[in-house]
Amino acid sequence: MLRRAAIVIGLAVAVLLAGTVPAASAQRTVLAEMFGATWCGYCPNATVALQQLQEEYGTDGLVCFYYHVGDAYATAETHNRASYYAVGGIPEVDFDAVTEVVGAGTNIYDVYAPIVATRYAESTPVTIRTEGVIYAAGDPDSSWVTAVFKAVDTVPYGDLRAYFIVCENTSEVYPWTVRDMLPPSTVTTLAAAGDSVVITRKFKVDAAWDLEELGVVVFIEDTDPKLIVNAQVMPAPFSNSFGHADRYAVEIDYLGEAIYHIVLENTGVMSDVITVDIGHDIIPDGLGSWDWVAFYCDTDGACHFGPWDFVLEPAAKETFDVHILDNVGHTQGMALTTLSATSTSDPSMMSSESFATFVDLPSVLLVDDDGGASDETYLETALTDTGYTAMVWDAEVRGRPCMTRLESYWAVLWTTGGGSAADLGGSCENNMAAYLDGGGNLLLSSMEFLSSRVNTLAFRTDYLHIDSYTSDNGGFVVTGETGDAISAGMSLNLLGGPFAPNPSDVFVAGSAADVIFTSPAGTEGIRVEENDHKVVFLSFPFEDVKTTEAAPNNQKTLIGRILNWFSLPSGVEAGQVHRLALQPNYPNPFNPVTRVAFSVPEAAGRVSLTVHNVNGQVVRTLVDSELPAGPALAVWDGTDDLGRPLASGIYFAKLASSEDSAFRKMTLLK
């Protein structure tokens, strides 16, 4: 008889006792059966690691259960399953009943990952296809599941048993909670390739369960020895999904057009009528839906400006071209447009995709990864004050963005605020690395990213170029580096912000990274430029930088300098500027905000940037101070020095030092 391999996480690690599995010809879904409880302090480590792995493999590659023991979620059935596995301590996770892991430290992902990879690589001789419907609380037969077990190769097992499990995602901490274990069935007629068995089970949904968080998992087990042969999550009967679009953001000029290509698929197991609709979520103030027009065209070439029904069989697809048109021609900003698809059979089955069209603006994605808080508003406001706008991506609601989304944007700003960076897992780091490989610009602001990582990927060493770090050692003040294009002249007081800065990590930067911020405890900010990409990493909270301090010690100046550095041609640094240079303002014409980029040479002394009317009078002073050599950025909002809005017309920007001056014409339109 084969014995399961056991790994005990604690003072000692047991030797892995590997069982042998016969060769077969179908892809398996790995089953992870977790035993835990609400009072178990180490159980959340296990669920976080399993969630990360399930994100990487998908539910087609990894299925998880949470059998509760000794708490309010526990049932006689979950206790029986624990006895079946002779569970002695929790958390315990049994992978395909071949390898068990007892205990869970902060590095438990590194223990689970190779086990899942090994099991996933083992093929299986039995496939499972399921369909069914889950209805709200009603009679015992109101909900049902049918499973077809089919042998695709010789089945060298003995006592096969089919299980049907009803699970509920009761919370982020307690996902996959086992609610009901339907009576198992003995399977005796699966032996040779082509054999199949069909089993149907009916069940009742308890009124206390959340219908939208319920699911059914079916698996087949060889009871002697204990071995999971295969598993599958029952697909939704009515569901639809949009595949990856060709892009998710486009930059257009005034009177331009953005076109996005995307495919809708009926991912349910039944025929359905799906209603597709389109609309703007965000457009600039004062604009209407016909100023920036949104519509979609289907496979037949018919174009729709509102809802339209499409009849799709299971697995059938419909291709759409989504069009966004600027019919105004003088307003910059972002249109956030959503294409939605809703099942008429089950209106709760809805999918959507959003597209960000940037009119006369560079495309910026702001990844809000702060655990559901609203910390991203600090960065979003600083962007707006600097004349930029961003597509905000709430990772708590929408999951973390994949590579296909990141690569659509000129710059990605990723902040974890006060949330745990442990949720920023290996797939996220791989996506960020691939984005940088494609020539992207990345700002990662996370005060606990280094110390709370649960993976051992090379992103830290190969992209951030950080050699080592110390956790929870941040300072109350971080200071910039003399002559640096981003941090020169900065002294940022972090006390009094939304977060205590002391949990910030400090680190030792490698030779490929330029240090830009330090505290008495060590380095807390770097920038890296290599292989046509640029990255800025801050281990102190951006949100703690003040908004009310004078330049350069505020959020607006910090984000403005970072984005200005991103926009520099490769290799241009602070000390390479030889004379005053005033770039054309952007956008121009403008309303209500324009950005004025300029460069200052070494030893320029006091520099002024002023705005003049057509009579030569100074109406606004934007800069009047000594600046470090290198690029700089100022923003003018169309007001005078007293904050009064100025009339439409021609204005001139003048950049001057004691040795040089430069002028640019600007047009304010209202």
Image (tube, rainbow, N blue to C red):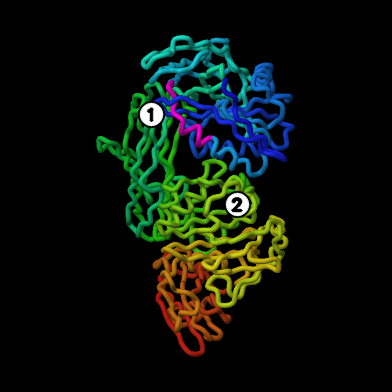
Task: Find residue 604 and report its horizontal and vertical position in percent.
Answer: 52, 85
Q: Which segment did they paint magenta?
A: 116-127
Q: Position of residue 312 (x, y in %)?
A: 34, 26
Q: Residue at x 58, y 36 (%)?
A: 50
Task: Tell me which label, 2 or 1, sits earlier in the chain.
Answer: 1
Which residue occupies the extreme bottom position in the image? Answer: 659
Residue 551 visible, this angle: no
Q: Which of 570 and 589 is in front in this view?
A: 570
Would you say residue 496 sits in the magenta stretch? no
SS at circle 2: loop
Report the amino acid beneath label 1.
Answer: Asn
Does 629 sit above or below residue 163? below
Residue position marked by numbered label 1 in the rendering = 266
**What amino acid does circle 2 point to?**
Thr
Label 2 sits on residue: 416
Dot 2 and dot 1 residues touching (CB under 8 Å): no
